[in-house]
Amino acid sequence: MTSFLKLALRNGMRHKLRTGLTVLGLVVAILSFGLLQSIVDAWYAGADRAAANRLVTRNAISLVFPMPINYREKIRAVEGVRSVAVANWFGGVYRDTSMANFFPRFAVDAEQYFAMYPEYVLNEDEFRAFLRDRKGAVIGRKLALQHGFRIGDTIPIQGDIFPGNWEFTVRAIYDGAEPNTDTSLMFFHFDYLNETLKQRVPGRADKVGVFVVAIEDVGRAAEIARAIDEQFKNSAAETLTETEKAFQIGFAKQTEAIVIAVRFVSYVVIAIILAVMANTMAMTARERMTEYATLKALGFPPAFIAALILGESLAIAVIGAAIGIGLTFPVGYWFAAKMGTLFPVFGISPQTVGLQAVCALVVGIAAALLPMRRAARVNIVEGLRFVG
Amino acid sequence: MSADGTALVQVRGLTKSYRRGGQRVPVLSDINLDIRRGDFLALMGPSGSGKSTLLNMIAGIDKPDAGQVLVDGVDIARLSESELAAWRAAHVGFIFQFYNLMPVLTAVENVELPLALTSLPRRERRARAETALRLVGLEDRMTHLPSELSGGQQQRVAIARAIVTDPTLLVADEPTGDLDRAAAEEILGLLERLNTELGKTIVMVTHDKRAADRAHAIMYLEKGELSTAEDVAERSVRASRHA
Ligand SMILES: Nc1ncnc2c1ncn2[C@@H]1O[C@H](COP(=O)(O)OP(=O)(O)OP(=O)(O)O)[C@@H](O)[C@H]1O
Ligand SMILES: [Mg+2]
């Protein structure tokens, strides 16, 4: 056993540059894989945060088509519905269109909306001040910290979906009840949006993108959703009501092609490093055929020789994986910080780390398979002849 | 065992051919050979005559097409791959032209290597390896890597590795082929000592007449046939003495 370890480990150190470069390649691959997986996770994070007792009603055709405001009362009248709140995506630009300055903004029925979202924890005095201020805004802690917004500050937004210049005054800052609560959002009063639209572009007033619906009984979600949609059958704006989770997944799915591409690329990276590593191991094993033939002549079984190659390959894979996984955390958080609020709850999950380890292991084993087979089967006489 | 008159190695009707481009190239045909215990046999012959092929089959790293190779009563041509590997580990010491040491192992680790296949405790393995290295006069080079040793020294490490398991048979394929005269003489002297002092049975393939003369007997292989050629050997011995 000691001879085995000495041979396997020292063999690995024989070509320091080659081994070093292979390890470097593995580090980059495992790191990239981890980052890409974490980005996909962050993209779907909204769905994980969704509560089961909230439904989302939108236009059945597409999110981009609105519904009349009077649906609010009709939905509230549906049996099993506790409350309804408008939640309109506002869009707009703060300062410039860079990622660093992007954050989501919603126009909501504040009282009802925040009652449905206990995960947004508010100071009562601040919240009351917000309710009193028509142009008031509630922002998340992460957003406040990122831009240095304080209570009383004015946030100017250049409208795009809703044209014109808009100004909001920060009246309350919410904290997350859970570590994965998104605190990078901004909310303001739907009434302010709607009344302003009545003056500026009357045709666009009294229209709503999304209703959030709180229900009494989680078990009846499907039934209530159907009842809501039934109300608007054969009207100009038919609705589609689903659980918040389904809605979030659907929203993320709009970009599914990109997400699939990102996932695909993450595995392509692994496939590439596998090819590189397999080539390294094949080269290494070919160079040492005479040594393997000598070992066999001395009476060492083929399995010993196969294990030597596997051991060397695994050692390289384990070192590369350890460094790669170790780097995923600092690099990942640095990257997420650079991306601002695009990934509000970026995190590197244990599953991602596990997947990185599995990939490295698979690479280590797969890269060794062919060289192992060839070396273990080397014909002693031919292998020895190699020298001359 | 086979002490009373029977030879340690009995080669009977050994035949071997290689296939090259769909054609069968006969190398050895119906070879018969006896090697007694304690013998030191030199095998000579022109290049390509099949010396290495014959040696490889006696050492159990190649298999004949037909015929028997009995070593100490065991027909090794009939053993399975794994049985043969175990047999080699226990009974054969190999000495190669290019030493074939593991470049990443030190001298003493190289010598110790074949003992990894035994159940000896670690300490005992190291002690035996050191004894073998002392026997070949390399006690002061134990922790040197092969790359830090001369060709002659490397071959002495290889000889120490070949004898550390106390094998029945030592096989050497041109052990001095890669060495200068002085180093070759040292190696041959060492082999002679192993033969006379430790009673090791040695089969050595060589191109070198002077090397062959150190052996007890010389055999010639030519065109697939083995001739005892004792007269030839005798003559050459006399010639070299009168020179
Ligand atoms: N694997 C092989 N495939 C085809 N032919 C082979 C193979 N091995 C050996 N031969 C042929 O068998 C013959 C004998 O080879 P061998 O190596 O035994 O010769 P040798 O007497 O040891 O020669 P040398 O003195 O040059 O080492 C040669 O003609 C060689 O070309
Ligand atoms: Mg030869």
Image: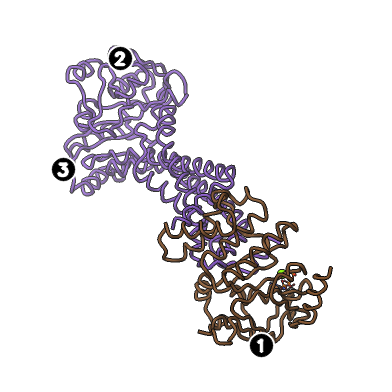
Chain colours: A purple, B brown
Question: Where is B225 relative to A273, above or below?
Answer: below
* Label 1 SS: strand
Q: Position of residue A385 (x, y in %)?
A: 68, 65
Judge by depth and name the residue closer to the eye, A171 or A268: A268
Quadrant where the N terminus of chain A sits is bottom left
Amino acid under disc 3: Glu
| Badge 3 vs badge 1, beta-carbon distance below 8 Å | no
Judge by depth and name the residue closer to the eye, A350 or B209: B209
Which residue corresponds to mark 1?
B13
Which residue corresponds to mark 2?
A150
Counting the numbered discs, the total is 3
Amino acid under disc 1: Gly
- Which residue shows up at 62% across the image and 75% down it? B62
Are tags 2 and 3 found on a single chain? yes
| Badge 2 vs badge 3, beta-carbon distance below 8 Å | no
Q: Position of residue A13 (x, y in %)?
A: 54, 46
Separation of residues labelled 2 and 3 (CA atoms): 42 Å
Which residue corresponds to mark 3?
A79
Q: Residues within 10 Å of mark 3 (few under 14, many from 20)?
A: few
